[in-house]
Image (tube, rainbow, N blue to C red):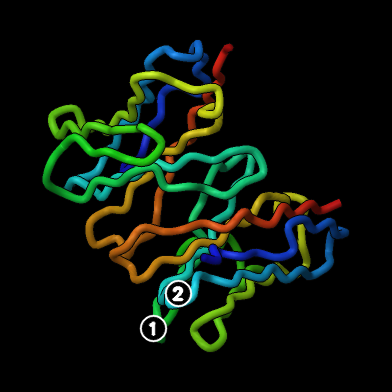
């Protein structure tokens, strides 16, 4: 069956530009998570969505980062006015609910020039 | 402070040898515990998890892990390593009542010598 799908797989952009990263979770999974993996900081939680509840944004590093999840399915992570320190792999995961293990996509590698 | 520690950044073993990757956690109550593996350019794959009950947990690909409350450890083991096991391994926790937000250790890079 289909796993978690992320697009694009790679993104190169100039400093100051906005970027959008997309995540398509496993069908039927109500919980969706975003993590960031960088050389300096390792794997960090960013945000998660559970059903229709307000998202937990406690891991977002600045107000340049935002995410939405439309229709309880696809999610978009947006980074405005990108900085070089935003260069990282952005991983999305989904789970059946918050009591079940998370399944990860292959990530989007973001490079800021 | 709450933390997850993987003391070994790199480990090299010979194919066929046994493997143990260490993970220690520092939380007030025992968290939920996980091991994930990441191959280059790939996402994270769940190897095994511990929520409660039997302290020896069996996972995929021949891996197992043992939860030891007295040592606050959850070490990953494999009796005989295959070359295809070369990857990065992450221990992760979710604090009980933590809303399923994974906190990861820094990872252990495993190299397998043929």
> To which quarter of the image does residue A12 belong?
bottom right
Q: Are marks 2 and 1 in contact (CB under 8 Å)?
A: yes
Q: Position of residue B69 (x, y in %)?
A: 15, 34
Could you say whether the residue bearing mark 2 is in a helix, strand or loop?
strand
Tell me how many marks there are.
2
Between A33 and B61, the one lying in front of the other is B61
Say whether residue B10 is left or right of residue A40: left
Between A26 and A56, the one lying in front of the other is A26
* Residue at numbered disc 2: A49
Say whether residue B80 is left or right of residue A17: left
Asked if B57 appears above or below A64 in the picture, the reply is: above
Between A110 and B55, the one lying in front of the other is B55
- Mark 2–mark 1 distance (CA, rounded to whole Å): 7 Å
Asked if B56 appears above or below A18 in the picture, the reply is: above
* Residue at numbered disc 1: A53
Q: Position of residue A77 (x, y in %)?
A: 63, 70
Residue at 49% x, 84% y: name it. Answer: A72
Confirm whether circles 2 and 1 share one chain: yes
Pointer 1 indicates a residue of which chain? A
Residue at 53% x, 70% y: name it. Answer: A25
Q: Position of residue A103 (x, y in %)?
A: 46, 58
């Amino acid at each position: 069956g289909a796993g978690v799908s992320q697009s694009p797989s790679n993104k190169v952009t100039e400093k100051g530009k906005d970027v959008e990263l997309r995540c398509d979770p496993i069908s039927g999974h109500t919980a969706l998570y975003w993590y960031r993996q960088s050389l300096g900081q390792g794997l960090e939680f960013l945000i998660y969505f559970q059903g229709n509840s307000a998202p937990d944004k406690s891991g977002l590093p600045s107000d340049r980062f935002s995410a939405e999840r439309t229709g309880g399915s696809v999610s978009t992570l947006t980074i405005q006015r990108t900085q070089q320190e935003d260069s990282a792999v952005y991983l999305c995961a989904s789970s059946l609910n918050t009591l079940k293990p998370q399944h990860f996509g292959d990530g989007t590698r973001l490079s800021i020039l | 402070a709450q933390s997850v520690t993987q003391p070994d950044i790199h480990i090299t073993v010979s194919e066929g040898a046994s493997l143990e990757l260490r993970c220690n956690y520092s939380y007030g109550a025992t968290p939920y515990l996980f091991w994930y593996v990441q191959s280059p350019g790939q996402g994270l794959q769940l190897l095994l998890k511990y929520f409660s009950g039997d302290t020896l947990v069996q996972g995929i690909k021949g891996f197992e892990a043992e939860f030891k409350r007295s040592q606050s450890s959850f070490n990953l083991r494999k009796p005989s390593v295959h070359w295809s096991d070369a990857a990065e391994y992450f221990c992760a926790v979710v604090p009980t009542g933590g809303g399923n937000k994974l906190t990861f250790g820094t990872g252990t890079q495993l190299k397998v010598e043929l």
